[in-house]
Image (tube, helix red, strand yellow):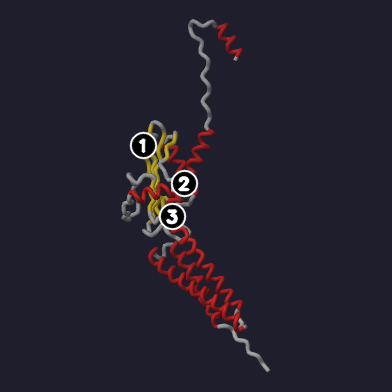
Amino acid sequence: MRILIRTSKWAIWARRFGSLAVPLTIVPVLLHREQFISSADFAIVESVAAGVAALALILALSAYARLWMTGDQGWGKASLGLFFAIVCLLPFGYLAAQAARYPQVNEVATSFGDPLPLSSSIRVLPTSAALQELIEATFPNARTRSYPIDATQMFATIEDLVEERGWEVRTRRAPPTALDAGQLNAISVSLFGFRDEVAIRVAGSPAGSTVDMRSVALSGFHDFGENGRRVEDLLLALDAQITLLLRNAPQAPAADLEIGENDDPGEAGEAVAAE
């Protein structure tokens, strides 16, 4: 007598939907990073991918319950579908956590009263006073910096930091002299392909230079804290760079001992020897 052991259809469909969710999740990210699709289209496709992955998760869990009760085959297929579903849903879980952690903004600046001009032709709504206070509390290191370094040297240091981060420089206007101002605008691409514009201004003064920074999401969506973290990261790196520069700067030699007209050269020589 032959015993027929069936393969659970729940497990089969869990694997199928899980396998479909993988390319639906990954391929749009690659297309978005290369700008083959817009941010709006990317959000729509990823929403569909999240729905397919969630369905695969439900089917896999249902298949587990079915297999436990009936003894059918399909544990491997259900497990594969569950694995694919979890992998595809992890990025959405990360974004949901970031959205809950950070305020819903698409711009962070060190000076909202004097916003730095952008090279991109987008309309940015003014940030309310209440939202500015929330941004300042969330990103305490996103503040205007003043350093005892002249503007030309400061601008070169910032250019090095921008190059290290792989940002695409759009416009660059270096300060002509140590007392002038200069600005750099660049595009930063996030892991998921969202583009943000970064503007950095260096203003020279007799005491050194002042640095302001602005980071704006070009998509207009929730930035999930990306702009604030970017501003803090660069300014803290700049703090460390300038601290290292000042620490390694050669010290001015001590002033030579001067002998006055009424001083006795012999007494002066004895004083130097005593020192």
**Residue receiving disc 2:** 234
Q: Residue at x 42, y 34 (%)?
A: 150
- As drawn, 250 above or below 7: above
Query: Residue 191 appears at what percent x and percent y?
Result: 48, 59
Residue 102 badge: 3
Calculate the distance from the C-alpha at mark 3 to the C-alpha at mark 2.
Answer: 19 Å
| Quadrant of the frame with the N terminus | bottom right
Report helix, strand or loop for mark 1.
loop
Q: Which badge, 3 or 1, comes first in the chain's sequence? A: 3
Report helix, strand or loop for mark 2.
helix
Q: In the displayed structure, does residue 220 sit left or right of residue 19? A: left
Kindly identify the amino acid type of the residue bearing the numbered disc 2. Leu
Calculate the distance from the C-alpha at mark 1 to the C-alpha at mark 2.
Answer: 22 Å
Of circles 3 and 1, the one toward us is: 3
Residue 240 vs residue 252, the one in the foreground: 240
Q: Residue at x 49, y 61 (%)?
A: 94
Q: Which badge, 1 or 2, comes first in the chain's sequence? A: 1
Kindly identify the amino acid type of the residue bearing the numbered disc 1. Asp
Of circles 1 and 2, the one toward us is: 2
Q: Tell me which corner region of the image, top left, top right, bottom left or bottom right, holds residue 15.
A: bottom right
Looking at the image, the residue that sits furthest to the front is 69
Residue 180 badge: 1
